Image: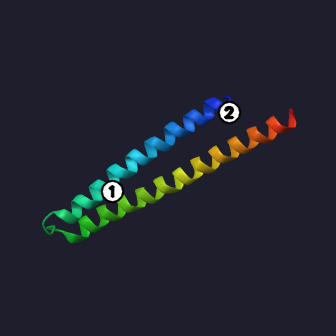
Amino acid sequence: MDIVGRLATIQESIQAVENEKEQRQQTLAAFWEHLPPIDPALVAAAMQRIRDRISVLEDRKRALLQEQEDLIVGAVIRGRQGD
């Protein structure tokens, strides 16, 4: 895949990560807005799974941003070498 194509794919992936993260955060917030759970341990476990997934999404976004930066810097360097 060429650099421009990969950069577009990265941007789409970043948007997908941000969308999923927002959905997970909304789900997590919903736990706090409702009445006390019948089984607090189950709710706590579900909330922890959501927090864990949010953390994974944040790591993925950081990796995508780093790859994006590396591609841009590499393209600039190659462009300067071609001058």
- The quarter in which the C terminus is drawn is top right
Pick whichever, 19 or 51, lies toward us.
Answer: 19
Q: How many marks?
A: 2
Residue depicted at 36% across the width and 60% down the height: 49
Q: Name the element at disc 2.
A: helix
Instruction: Give 64 or 78, whichever is nearer the viewer.
Output: 78
The residue under label 1 is 25
Which three-letter amino acid code belongs to the residue tagged 2? Ile
| Mark 1 secondary-structure assignment | helix
**Residue beneath label 2, please?**
3
Q: Quadrant of residue 30?
A: bottom left
Residue at image location 46% in from the left, 60% down from the top:
55
Can you say whether 58 is above or below 38 in the image? above
Can you say whether 57 is above or below 36 in the image? Answer: above
- How many residues crowd mark 2 within 10 Å: few (<14), some (14–19), many (20+)? few
What quarter of the picture does the N terminus occupy? Answer: top right
In front here: 4 or 58? 4
Q: Position of residue 79 (x, y in %)?
A: 80, 35
Q: Residues within 10 Å of mark 1 (few under 14, many from 20)?
A: some
Q: CA distance from mark 2 to mark 1?
A: 32 Å
Which residue occupies 18% across, 63% down?
33
Residue 27 is situated, as x and y percent measured from the top left of the image, at 27, 55
Q: What's the residue type where badge 1 is placed? A: Gln
From the viewer's perspective, tell me whether residue 45 is left or right of residue 21: left
- Where residue 75 sits: x, y (%)? 74, 38
Q: Quadrant of residue 71?
A: top right
